[in-house]
Image (spheres, helix red, strand yellow):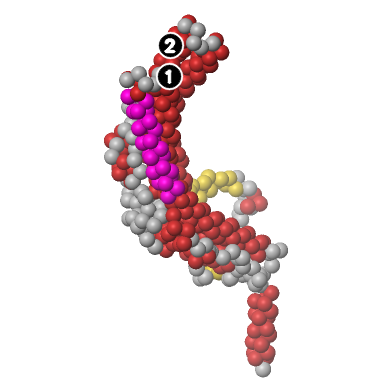
Amino acid sequence: MLSTQFKLALSAISVAVLAGCVNYAGIHAKGKLNTPQDIPSETVLDVHAPAAVNWPQDKWWEKFEDPQLNRLIQDALASNPDIAEVQARMDRATAFMDYANADRYPSVDAGAGISRSRLARSDDYAGLGNRYITLRSLDVQFGYTFDLWGGKRAAWESALNRATAAEVDVQSARLNLAASVAKAYNQLAFSWELLDLSERDLDRLEKMLTLSKQRFKLGLDNQSQLKLVEGLRNRASAQAIEGRNDIEISKLQLATLSGKGLDRALSIQRPQRMKPYVDGLPSNIPAELLGRRPDIVAARLRVEAELKNTDAVKADFYPNINLVASVGVHSLIGDGFFDSVSKFWRIAPAVTLPIFDAGRLRSTLRASNADLDVAIAQYNKTLNTAFHDVGASATQIHSLAGQVSEQEKARASTFESFTLAHDRYNVGQDSFLDYLNAERQLISDETQLALLRSKQVDASISLLVALGGGFRTAH
């Protein structure tokens, strides 16, 4: 009867203890991962880029067929400090992953020691004191915390996802760096083309100034007209100087991006004109883009990392078992060190159960869920930005194609007008001034055309980056 009553009491106490334990009821994340269906974009993408093309391939910059550009990008990927920084972050994340993995396994430590001491009379059983003893010890200690609820594995998986995200960050940094070099190279090509046009305009105004001086001496023009032409000539000269400066600045930017020092700029030659080679979008972008943009993949991995971290925190709410054991020898007698009387062993299992912690565990879980919500929000933002990048680049390419087409027609008409003015001047039907004015409009149209073509190349590079630049996740 007593035994039955004792069992009932023990059961009641157990239920009460478990009921009073810390729990995580009511704590959960609030965020929701968006999908491509949550941000419909197919109609806009189809309208602005109807042509179906393949996804970009790795080393997409080789499509520009410029060996100098290839070397500059290779130098940048090998030597730019930005790449070294993200690689160091990847190494750090990998180290934390290895640490979390090691925490799942038992620990074994060995110790050895020797000590010499003088006994006080109060410590001497014989009551004599003034005795000296030498203690020799050798032991092996074993420790293990059982992962009953999967908390340690979840912590390791969380660290694994963070390390993988850091690895993907390296690919993202490489993609953005290659794009920066390609755009800077395109700017250099445009600056050189602009300088050619500026020098042509300067030459035109030099001739116009010579003619104006002659007309002033003959009384055909007044001083105001002469000064106006002088001002135009000086302005053109300043633009030519600025053009040369733009070339040097672009070279220095490329040298800095390459990570090879400013002297690298001295070996950079005039680029050939770059031509865009992307004029459409691949099919099935909403589904495919998620696995082809490194920033999206990294953001998703960080969401998975926070999910696993939340699981690890929840495991701390449950009871767990620790096991500590040791075996070895202690001896006061040197020649009896390994005798049976010197040997010892100890095993100490322990059960831990959180009952009251003033809200520490619940606060930790709330913080973990908040981190998860942050990761989800960042993923949704990254996904939204990715579709914007694709749409904006495709729209710009579509618009620039129309602008270039119209500007080419304008340039063709202006060139025809310039040719007619040249012919009329040769037969004496127009003045040299009329001929120079026709050339001015031609230079203006060619400058605008060069600008639009440069923008086309930049938009093409932006679209390549927006489509992931050949990245393809294996995760």
Q: Which residue does the numbered mark 1 point to in the structure image?
A: 433
Of tags 2 and 1, which is closer to the observer?
Answer: 1
**How far, Cα to Cα, is label 2 from label 1?**
11 Å
Image spot of residue 396 (x, y percent):
46, 47
- Which quadrant would the N terminus be assigned to in this image? bottom right
User: Is 328 contained in the magenta span?
Assistant: no
Q: Residue at x 48, y 5 (%)?
A: 217
Q: Secondary structure at mark 2?
A: helix
Residue type at tag 1: Leu
Closer to the camera, 445 or 152? 445
Q: Is residue 356 left or right of residue 394?
A: right
Q: Which residues are magenta?
A: 398-423
Residue type at tag 2: Thr
Q: Is residue 15 left or right of residue 326?
A: right
- Which quadrant would the C terminus be assigned to in this image? bottom left
User: Is 406 contained in the magenta span?
Assistant: yes
Closer to the camera, 264 or 423? 423
Q: Residue at x 68, y 83 (%)?
A: 12
